[in-house]
Image (cartoon, coloured by chain):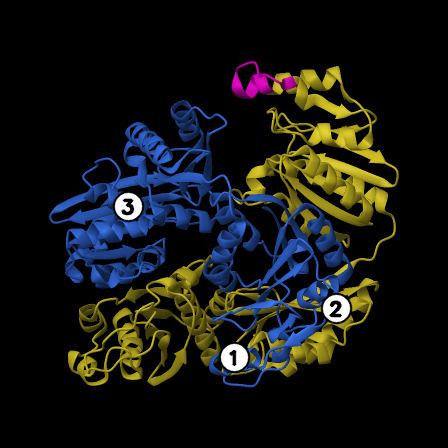
Chain colours: A yellow, B blue
Amino acid sequence: MKIELISVGSELVCGQIRDLNAPFVALKLTELGFNIVNHTISSDNSIQLKYSLQTASERAELIIMTGGLGPTNDDITREVVADFCNVALVSDQKTVDHVENLIGSIHNQKFVNSGKQAKVPEGGIIIHNTTGTAQGFLVKISQVSIICLPGVHTEMVRMFEDWVVPYILRESGERKKRYTRVFSTFGMPESILDEKVNRLVKPDKYVSYSTLVNNSTVLIRVTLCDRDEINAGSILDNIENEICRELGVSVFSTHEDTLENVISNIFKENTLTLAVAESCTGGLVSNLLTNVQGSSAYFLGGIVSYNNKVKERQLNVSEKLIKEFGVISAEIAKAMASGVRERLQADIGLSVTGIAGPTGIDIGVDQKRPVGLVYIATAINDDLECKEYRFFGSRADIKNHAANTALNTLRLSLSGKTAKQ
Amino acid sequence: MKIELISVGSELVCGQIRDLNAPFVALKLTELGFNIVNHTISSDNSIQLKYSLQTASERAELIIMTGGLGPTNDDITREVVADFCNVALVSDQKTVDHVENLIGSIHNQKFVNSGKQAKVPEGGIIIHNTTGTAQGFLVKISQVSIICLPGVHTEMVRMFEDWVVPYILRESGERKKRYTRVFSTFGMPESILDEKVNRLVKPDKYVSYSTLVNNSTVLIRVTLCDRDEINAGSILDNIENEICRELGVSVFSTHEDTLENVISNIFKENTLTLAVAESCTGGLVSNLLTNVQGSSAYFLGGIVSYNNKVKERQLNVSEKLIKEFGVISAEIAKAMASGVRERLQADIGLSVTGIAGPTGIDIGVDQKRPVGLVYIATAINDDLECKEYRFFGSRADIKNHAANTALNTLRLSLSGKTAKQ
């Protein structure tokens, strides 16, 4: 069954509001094995919306529309769908009463245009909205079914899960279930990953893959369809083994974990503690780590040593060292890592220092360092290591790349550079 | 000029990734007075994409496409557009060299398929990408112009602002200009704001407004159209005066500044310095502040005192105080604020301590505090103040609300609670 989604609302088309409905519906239905062919975001204009319905009906058997079911004059979905199906809009007294009672209980006042929200195209089936006033509906014309749901996300979700999904599952009959496995990678460019994965997976009508850059991470999603569940599991296991062997330590998760989740697991499994010293990342590394529930079990804290005096006083980085090597240097990064480890009494210290930009800084020895130059150091017991990086983009990009690279550096240092964790 | 947007990518159609590109482009062009008629989100399927191009060309004079310009086999935009325009894809050696140099400098390795990303439909004009490898282009067919930009949002934004907007302004001629003013507010619920603004603005066919929740901030966008510039300016000034008078300190910017930008300005104008102590926000406050270019002029740094021992040793919070009042308390928040101010020798100290969740914590006096309980304290000279909050939602929501409320608290404390800064 081919499914097309139409989200209705001029505030969506103008970019003022982000559409949450179509992505939600698409993800759920794709997971159930259905084929979403297209999304359209249409304005509150009858001609445009009817045109979108027309083109959708030419490429899909089911159209799911969200939005435009409210009480105002801008809400045109009912009228347009009725027009498209060449039927009248009719009311069901029971539904009118339901809507008015709902309004009364929510708002303690009579509501104009309440009648509008209880109307459906003649021949349609009402999809009840128990938490809001806009009732949805299903109509069929020729070989096409059209389902209309409200735009308010929470109401849409409830009606979708309670009514629409069971309906679609009943109506759809035989469909190809999909099995996916996602490989989260860091450190290898997308084009190289794509070339390697293409060679290993050998896409055909049963197995396909996609790559997706998500901040500094590249996700590889391998999808299998039209296989029974046992067979699919072992095929994906084989693919997983080959991908992990080929991509090595670039793969940090096969469970859609974030880098910070993976690090949290490593630290907890080894009962180690961590402290972080940050300069150019300004708190971002600590913020990422503390996004993980339970991180307080291993993460002691951090020092954001934005000013040089803070590096000196809180991290024991000597003024002499800063004068000699400059504050953006491997020597300072190492001193920060060992300093924060000692001061916070952690097993491991991690540090980041660099230039986030967009302007470079003069580091006191009349030497300009470029924007994007970053040093990341780790202090593991007495072992101090440091690596130099060059990142590109805006201030936000550089902070982001630097922070994620710091996390990845930590991961690799601790995992002793073995294959995926 | 009617404009249609097409975002290309199966990961968008499947709902895995949210499209940031079309909403961004739509908002900018709408503000400039252009008419966006539709968005389509298309999969990486040549037939579907060509069909979407076809329908778009029947209702718009300009089609802006984002995505599908990468190096992989799923990236089909160039091929489909060339096919639609019935021309071949050609390379420009200069552009090929540019792309290869860019790849070389980022990744230090040769890049397969680099040639693909430098190709354009014959007769097209290249839109250069200075921060990424996918070059964009403009082609014309009959009365329709097609602009293709990469899907990577930061790259798309830069090319859109540097090349596409000037191009469209040159080509577009006469259009109804729109004038907008945006009020950034914090602390008042959206429904109350909406009711007040509706009363003040009195929307009609010339003036309208919208409210948009963006994290903890609510943006109020007032739009005027079809007026000459002088008249529009003074009408908006009047509206601004009334809104600011009615909403008071809730309004923190009329220039689309973030809270952290506003704080940066306050600190610099008063030559004050700041230090931040964070527990539950885990580095997020420092991260937000350091997102602002030039923040090192006033922000000395921060202590992320995740573990109680770190509070004791780095912030001079006494173990006795923690035992007596519990670590989530106004007393500890105040001790953290004054502690970080002293230790980092700043004029102002700010602290946040609380429970981000999703589980509550036992605080040592056999008393459970609820998830979302947060204390925010400021230390301004000898003046210590603290306020208690209850936030709701996921761990990320609570961290986010707490961090932004901390910034707002700082803003209000410093601005002496006068009207907008």
* Residue depicted at x 28% and y 66%: A303
B66 and A413: which one is in front?
B66
Q: Position of residue B98 (x, y in %)?
A: 52, 79
Residue extent of the magenta highlight: A103-114
Cα distance in 3D space between marks 3 and 2: 50 Å
Instruction: Please say whether residue B40 is visible from this viewpoint.
Output: yes
Q: Where is residue B227 in the image (x, y as percent from the top left)?
A: 42, 33
Instruction: Please say whether residue B219 is visible from this viewpoint.
Output: no
Label pair 1/2, CB-CB below 8 angstroms: no
Cα distance in 3D space between marks 1 and 3: 51 Å
Q: Position of residue A325 (x, y in %)?
A: 23, 84
Q: Which mark is residue A392?
A: none
Mark 1 or mark 2, which is nearer to you? 1
Image-quadrant location for residue A317? bottom left
In this image, A337 relative to B180: left or right?
left
**Which amino acid lies under the numbered mark 1 shown in the image of this protein?**
His
N-term mark: 1 or 3: 1
In the image, is residue B169 part of the stretch drawn in magenta? no
**Residue on which disc 3 sits:** B376
**Chain designation of label 1:** B
Image-quadrant location for residue A311? bottom left
Q: Is residue B321 above or below residue A396?
A: above
Q: Is residue B135 above or below residue B291?
A: below
A17 and B250: which one is in front?
A17
B260 and B349: which one is in front?
B260
Numbered disc 1: secondary structure: helix
**Which amino acid lies under the numbered mark 2 shown in the image of this protein?**
Ser
**Which amino acid lies under the numbered mark 3 shown in the image of this protein?**
Ile
Numbered disc 3: secondary structure: strand
Q: Please identify the residue farthest to the left as the structure is shown.
A: B382
**Chain designation of label 2:** A
**Residue on which disc 2 sits:** A208
